[in-house]
């Protein structure tokens, strides 16, 4: 079955201020899993594409040449939050502090799992630039290991 790229790319998207969230159809996925499972999600930052299922960073031109995604839609944070109804989730992820996670009345318990999962994805990718960007973002929101 497909690899959960929509959820993982959404979490990555929320973690990087300059990221664009991208959704499109992928012919390889359609042939492997059927047309109804041919969607793919990734994020784009500058000249790079970060694929959360493959745990890889691609040069954007190379990614589009290899996977030839169709029906691609890209969203900024403002566009996504204004149309998706996920603004509350975005605010929870970007405005949560370590105190929110450590207090007995936790703001969002799932962040205790989500943030470490994102860190694991970053470390598994072996992409030093991505790891550095993630750590800088977590430091900017005063995130500390629970």
Image (spheres, rainbow, N blue to C red):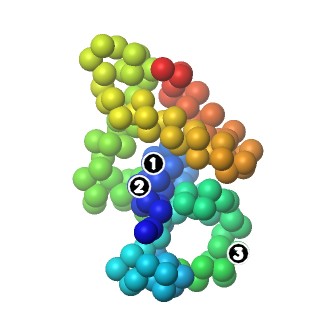
Residue 115, image x and y in percent? 48, 36
Circle 2 SS class: helix
Q: How far apart are marks 2 and 1 (CA)?
A: 6 Å
At horizontal 60% and vertical 62% (from top left) the residue drawn is 54
Are the residues at dot 1 and dot 3 in contact (C-beta closer than 8 Å)?
A: no
Res. 139 image quadrant: top right
Are the residues at dot 2 and dot 1 in contact (C-beta closer than 8 Å)?
A: yes
Residue 121, image x and y in percent? 58, 46
Q: Distance between the residues labelled 2 and 3?
A: 23 Å
Q: Residue furthest top?
A: 104
Can the viewer see residue 142 in this picture?
A: no
Q: Is 126 placed left or right of 108 in the picture?
A: right
Circle 1 SS class: helix
Q: Is 48 placed left or right of 106 in the picture?
A: right
Numbered badge on residue 11:
1
Q: How far apart are marks 1 and 3 (CA)?
A: 23 Å
Camera-nearest residue between 11 and 116: 116
Q: In this view, does 72 lie above or below 103?
A: below
**Residue tagged by mark 3?**
62
Numbered badge on residue 26:
none
Q: Which of marks 2 and 3 is nearer the N terminus?
A: 2
At horizontal 28% and vertical 58% (from top left) the residue drawn is 84
User: Which quadrant is home to the N terminus?
Assistant: bottom left
**Residue tagged by mark 2?**
7
Q: Is residue 140 above or below residue 127?
A: above
Q: Earlier in the sequence, mark 1 or mark 3?
A: 1
Q: In this view, does 29 lie above or below 9?
A: below
């Amino acid at each position: 079955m497909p690899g959960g790229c929509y959820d993982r790319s959404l979490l990555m998207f929320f973690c990087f201020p300059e990221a664009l969230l991208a959704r499109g159809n992928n012919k390889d996925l359609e042939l492997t899993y059927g047309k109804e499972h041919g969607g793919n999600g990734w994020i784009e930052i500058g000249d790079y594409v970060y694929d959360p299922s493959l745990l890889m960073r691609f040069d954007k031109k190379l990614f589009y040449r290899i996977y030839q995604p169709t029906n691609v839609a890209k969203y900024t944070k403002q566009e996504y939050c204004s149309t998706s109804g996920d603004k509350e989730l975005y605010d929870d992820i970007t405005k949560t502090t370590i105190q929110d996670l450590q207090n007995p009345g936790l703001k969002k318990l799932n962040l205790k799992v989500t943030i470490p999962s994102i860190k694991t994805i970053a470390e598994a990718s072996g992409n030093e630039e991505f790891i550095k960007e993630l750590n800088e973002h977590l430091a900017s929101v005063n995130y500390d290991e629970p």
